[in-house]
Amino acid sequence: MPEFLSCDPEDPPASELLGEMAEELNAMYWTRSRLDLPKVEPSEMCAPTGTYLVGWEGTRAVAGGGLRRFADGVAEIKRMFVRPSDRSRGIAGALLTELESAALALGYRVARLDTGPKQLHAIRLYEKAGYVPIDAYNDNPFACFWGEKELNRPSA
């Protein structure tokens, strides 16, 4: 599994991963506004209230994802992406676990996320990881699944 390290989302390789993800989603949903509704500023996925993690295998960045503050005690997981050549190896699940651990370390008790109807693999991943469907908490016109999970600290 990759080693996950915090990275500035505006610097490579994070910015490259975000660009690749934007291209893929915009093509998938036939729109250039897919990632503008709702908008996420890169600064929201930075300390002290957020992070952007890059998954490394050796010197190669294979995945990335971020989290930002949504509300008191609630983080929102955003922009999860695994490069196509690295999919189907469990990297997305490992990234999700790392993002949840980062959320706990930042003091969040709950994680939320959303995803669209053309990302069935993502919906399955989130449900398997314990995200339960909730009412829409944002006005994302591309989402069909909004999920929430109570984060638990690992037992000692």
Image (cartoon, helix red, strand yellow):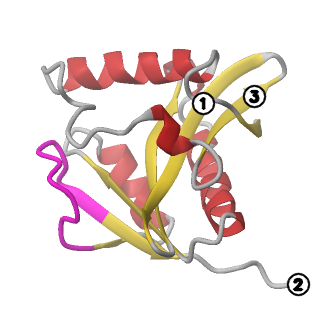
Residue 140 magenta-drawn? yes
Given contact means CB atoms under 8 Å apart, are the residues at marks 3 and 1 in contact?
Answer: no
Using the rendered image of the protein, determine whether residue 1 is visible from the camera's viewpoint. Answer: no
Q: Residue at x 51, y 37 (%)?
A: 43
Between 104 and 96, the one lying in front of the other is 104
Q: Residues within 10 Å of mark 2 (few under 14, many from 20)?
A: few
Q: Residue at x 43, y 45 (%)?
A: 78
- For residue 56, which numbered disc appears in the image? 3
Using the rendered image of the protein, determine whether residue 114 is visible from the camera's viewpoint. Answer: yes
SS at badge 1:
strand
Q: Residues within 10 Å of mark 3 (few under 14, many from 20)?
A: some
Going from the N terminus, do you reach mark 1 or mark 2 first? Answer: 1
Kind of residue at badge 3: Trp
Look at mark 2 in the image and give the residue it sits on: 156
Q: CA distance from mark 2 to mark 3?
A: 28 Å
The picture places residue 13, in percent across and down from the top left corner, at: 64, 17
The picture places residue 107, in percent across and down from the top left corner, at: 64, 71
The picture places residue 73, in percent across and down from the top left corner, at: 51, 75
Q: Is residue 108 left or right of residue 27?
A: right
Main secondary-structure element of the magenta-colored stretch: loop
Q: Which residues are magenta?
A: 134-146
Q: Is residue 6 left or right of residue 145?
A: right
Vertical relation: 66 (above or below) 151? above
Going from the N terminus, do you reach mark 3 or mark 1 first? Answer: 3
The picture places residue 139, in percent across and down from the top left corner, at: 14, 53
Look at mark 1 in the image and give the residue it sits on: 63
